[in-house]
Image (cartoon, grey):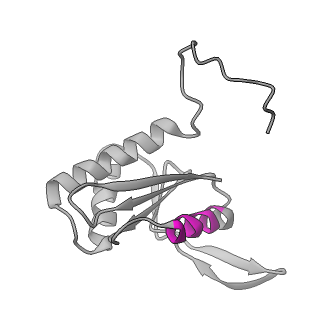
Amino acid sequence: MDTDQRPDLRRGGGSKFLLKTETEKIIGFAFEVLNEIGHGLNEKIYENSLTVLFKQNNIAFDQQRRFSVVFRGVQVGEFIPDLIAFGSVIVDTKVIDRITDHERGQMLNYLRITKLRVGLILNFKNSRLEFDRIVL
C-alpha cells in the first residue's frame, strides 16, 4: 500500500467501487423482495424472487450455473452459486442469524472459483435486510 499518496477528500466525483451501480440495483431489489414477501422464509424463495425482478428489468443473470472445482489439474467437485447477475456479481441469498466471517470467507472462495471480482451476501432472516459486499 502506498501511504505517500493521500486521496483528495475535497474533490467530489464518482465512486471507484467496482460494479457499484450493479450492486446497488441488486440490493435495491433485495429490499423490494423483503418488503413484499417478508422475512425468514426459505432461501430459495428469495433467490427465485430476485430472478423475477431481474427478468422484469431485463438484467442478465444465471441461476444455479455450475463451475468446476479443480485441484492440481483434477476436477474434484462443483460449485453452484445461487445467482450471477449482470454476468459479473455473485448473489448469495441467506436466511441466517447474521453474516459472519464464515460467509465472507465462503464468498471469497466463490469469487476465486468463478474468477469474478464482486459478490453480495443478502440475509433475509430478519425484518431488516442485512447485506455484505465482497470484492476480490
Q: Residue at x 37, y 66 (%)?
A: 98
Residue 17, position in %: x, y? 57, 36
Camera-nearest residue between 1 and 50: 1
Which of the image's four quarters has the N terminus?
Answer: top right
Where is 125 relative to 54, above or below? below
List the single residue furthest toward the right.
72
93 drawn magenta: no
Where is 41 relative to 51, above or below? below
Tell me which corner region of the image, top left, top right, bottom left or bottom right, holds residue 109.
bottom right
Camera-nearest residue between 59 and 97: 97
Q: Judge from the rendering whether residue 65 lies leftward or rightward of residue 123; answer left or right.
A: right
Q: Judge from the rendering whether residue 63 lies leftward or rightward of residue 48; answer left or right.
A: right
Residue 65, position in %: x, y? 52, 69
Q: Main secondary structure of the magenta part?
A: helix
Q: Residue at x 56, y 50 (%)?
A: 88
104 drawn magenta: yes
Q: Residue at x 20, y 59 (%)?
A: 127
Tell me which corner region of the image, top left, top right, bottom left or bottom right, holds residue 58.
top left
Q: Residue at x 29, y 64 (%)?
A: 46
Where is 114 relative to 128, above or below? below
Residue 42, position in %: x, y? 27, 75
Tell me which corner region of the image, top left, top right, bottom left or bottom right, holds residue 9.
top right
Q: Which residues are magenta?
A: 101-111
Residue 106, position in %: x, y? 57, 70
